[in-house]
Image (cartoon, rainbow, N blue to C red):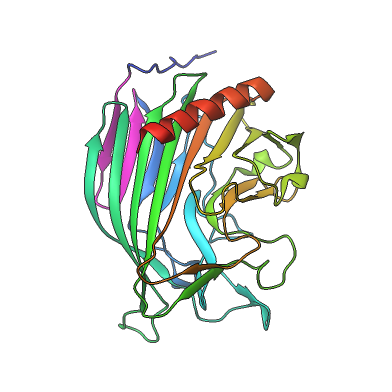
Amino acid sequence: MTTTAQPTLTDTITYTDDGRSLTFTVGTQDIATYTYLPTDDQYESPRPFFHPLTTLEGDEVTIFRPWDHVWHKGLSWALPNVGEHNFWGGATYTRKTGYANLDNNGAMNHETFTSIQDTGSGITAAESLLWTGQPSGAGQDGQHLIAEKRRFGIQLLPTVNAWALLFETEMSNVSGAEIGIGSPTTEGRDNAGYGGLFWRGPRSFTGGEFRSENGAGSDEFMGTRSPWIAFTGQHDVTCRKSSILFVEDQANPGASNQWFARSSMFACLGSAPFFSEVVPLKEGQPLTYRYAVVVADGALEDEQAATLADAAKSALDGWL
């Protein structure tokens, strides 16, 4: 049996840029790829995404374009109800139409990386994006809606065999009118408040276990509130277990916000600050949200999960 050398905090995180995506590497193991120039169809609401995300032992913890929801792209910032626009992909749910294809699928367009720096504790990239509505015709530009300043960082954590993806978004309204950001639940569909920083796991993770300060379980974690939440699943082929853990910055508007959490249908987890209430995005009043997403080898018991959440929170606080 071949064993993999375990990276340590002294290992260097490096990255490469192929002109379309950034790939981050620890030692010889690629752990994250960020595609900033996607080639997706407009119906899938083109946007940057992280895939694959991989543990330090080499197990992949994301899925890309699953047949049931081809607009699910690993880990991405995705919002289904942005005024009349859809930045999630697929059909839009509204109180009037239910799920319907409304020709309203926008795009989060990468403009430039303003910096990509080695901070000493990892690598941080700063990016500017312009969100545009669906073009009304071929060769036309979509309406300018939101100017986003995004930062993300890749760091190793000083506990267990884990690394953290730190994520920050600042969204500014450039549309000329107030935009209400909601979800299918704010449009009347019960317990479907998805929208935010959203992760979709491998098929083999179906039936895995959630864990937070509220205990452990499955789909009953949908819509719950807690500063952090973890999910553990098991891989095909290697039969190993891996965990992903989200920590929300408690300075976020509305924190602790609700989590969108599913296990029995398929494994997914996401921050959902617009789950049950429409949040207004006003001109001159940007909205900022910050998270840490941890990828760890192995299962997480109560004490391990809490310790890892504390380490991720410290990394997020220090990242300011």
Q: Which residue: 31% across, 83% down?
A: 140
Tell me the quarter of the image containing the C terminus.
top left
Name the spot of residue 286 as percent of width and height, x first: 39, 62
Which contiguous range is marked in magenta? 11-27
Tell me the quarter of the image containing the N terminus.
top right
Task: Report which quarter residue 288 is drawn in.
Answer: bottom left
* Magenta stretch: includes residue 77: no
Viewer-proximal residue among 307 and 236: 307
Q: Is residue 268 left or right of residue 130?
A: right
Task: Report which quarter residue 108 is drawn in.
Answer: bottom left
* Magenta stretch: includes residue 20: yes
Name the spot of residue 102 as percent of width and height, x first: 55, 81
Q: Which residue: 57% across, 56% down?
A: 273
Q: Main secondary structure of the magenta part?
A: strand
Q: Is residue 301 visible?
A: no
Q: Is residue 191 above or below residue 262?
A: below
Q: Is residue 4 left or right of residue 303?
A: left
Name the spot of residue 213 as percent of width and height, x first: 68, 33
Q: Is residue 241 above or below residue 134?
A: above
Name the spot of residue 256 as percent of width and height, x first: 60, 46
Viewer-proximal residue among 154 and 214: 214
Q: Is residue 283 left or right of residue 18?
A: right
Q: Is residue 2 visible?
A: yes
Q: Which residue: 26% across, 31% down?
A: 119
Q: Is residue 168 above or below residue 69?
A: above
